[in-house]
Image: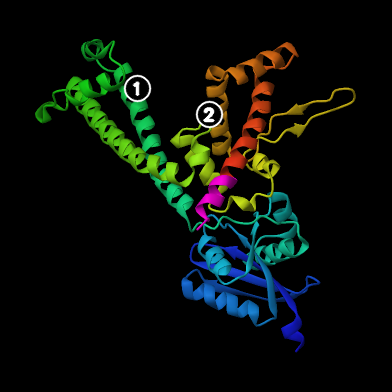
């Protein structure tokens, strides 16, 4: 009867093939710890094990966006409150040690104390679909950038005749010219012919990556427009920017309690940097840097094309603010619009 009335808080240290769970009571006393396989059957066993100690109030899970994603989905679907736990920093691990049971117990006690209150992304809706499509696109963009750097590096050190032949060409024209270079397999010991072969191979790779990126864009544009019409209509928010902000907020943007929470998540919240008679704020270097870059893109677009923003920049410049400080302020204003648009799109998606 006592066990049935006991309130239990769980903590899970997640890994690729196994998860280690710990359970504590209301006073933080350890009830037990055990390891489970990171499979659907293992998730069920972990939850049954926790429920054997009493009524499960909540479970703190490390890595809900990586190794713990499947477990977080299973617990949420079972009606259990899941709390996102940050991994302990190096100072804490030096003082308290590092092991799976220690990390699981720390996760449980962090959830119990209320120190961690973050709600993880649900990862079960259209935003998750957009995220995984963007992963493929982002990988192709990075590979294309690396290939273009290789191409220009080879051209810089190429034999004089070949370098002069390619001089003055840029962009698509340069890539196509390299694709069309003549390659003789029997003479690849000659530096000129070997460079031709290398340039042709890299340019062919760039062409294929361009086609892959264009195909990804054709998939993403309608998906982003359907999922977030209000966000897509914001000045400066194209499909790529809107897709990144959607990915940062997740399928459940209502987990962000206020626009201030979204600002902190995006690294756009002002950080006090006052001392003595100096009263100022500095740039926030934390948060999701990809989301901060998306805000940066919106701000740059508005500073160039939006009359209201240009008037604001002129006013703040006359007040003595520098460009970085002005952009920090603008990002915070943009967050307000983004938060409103995200909630409107979320409400529209869940309206029958």
Element on which disc 2 rests: loop
Does the rendering let one see residue 96?
yes
Q: Residue at x 59, y 50 (%)?
A: 253
Residue 4 location, x and y as percent?
72, 84
Q: Residue furthest right?
A: 276
Q: Quadrant of residue 191?
A: top left
Does the rendering let one see residue 157?
no
The stretch in magenta equals: 343-352
Q: Which residue is mark 1?
A: 153
**Camera-side residue: 62 or 72?**
72
Element on which disc 1 rests: helix
**Camera-side residue: 168 or 81?**
81
Could you tell whether 282 is left or right of 172 in the image? right
Q: Is residue 340 above or below residue 278?
A: below
Q: How many marks?
A: 2
Q: Which residue is mark 2?
A: 235
């Amino acid at each position: 009867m006592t066990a049935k009335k006991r309130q239990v808080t769980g903590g899970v240290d997640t890994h690729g093939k196994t998860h280690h769970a710990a359970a504590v009571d209301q006073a933080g006393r350890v009830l037990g710890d055990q390891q489970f396989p990171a499979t659907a059957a293992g998730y069920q066993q972990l939850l049954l094990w926790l429920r054997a100690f009493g009524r499960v109030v909540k479970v703190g899970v490390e890595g809900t966006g990586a190794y713990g994603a499947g477990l977080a989905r299973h617990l949420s679907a079972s009606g259990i409150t899941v709390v996102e736990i940050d991994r302990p920093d190096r100072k804490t691990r030096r003082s308290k040690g590092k092991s799976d049971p220690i990390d699981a117990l720390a996760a449980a006690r962090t959830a119990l104390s209320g120190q961690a209150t973050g709600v993880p992304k649900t990862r079960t809706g259209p935003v998750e679909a957009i995220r995984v499509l963007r992963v493929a696109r982002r990988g192709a963009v990075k590979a294309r950038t690396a290939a273009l750097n290789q191409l220009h590096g080879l051209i810089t050190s190429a034999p004089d005749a070949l370098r002069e032949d390619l001089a003055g060409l840029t962009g698509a024209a340069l890539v196509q010219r390299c694709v069309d270079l003549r390659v003789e397999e029997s003479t690849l010991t000659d530096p000129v012919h070997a460079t031709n072969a290398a340039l042709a191979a890299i340019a062919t790779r760039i062409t294929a990556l361009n086609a892959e990126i264009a195909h990804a864009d054709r998939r993403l544009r309608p998906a982003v427009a359907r999922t977030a019409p209000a966000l897509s209509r914001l000045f400066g928010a194209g499909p790529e920017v809107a897709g990144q902000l959607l990915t940062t907020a997740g399928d459940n943007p209502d987990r962000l309690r206020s626009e201030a929470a979204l600002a902190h998540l995006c690294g756009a919240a002002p950080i006090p940097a006052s001392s003595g008679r100096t009263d100022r704020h500095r740039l926030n270097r934390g948060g999701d840097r990809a989301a901060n870059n998306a805000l940066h893109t919106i701000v740059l677009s508005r500073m160039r094309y939006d009359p209201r923003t240009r008037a604001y920049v002129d006013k703040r410049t006359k007040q003595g603010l520098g460009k970085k400080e002005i952009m920090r302020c603008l990002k915070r204003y943009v967050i307000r619009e983004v938060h409103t648009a995200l909630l409107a799109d979320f409400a529209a998606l869940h309206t029958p």
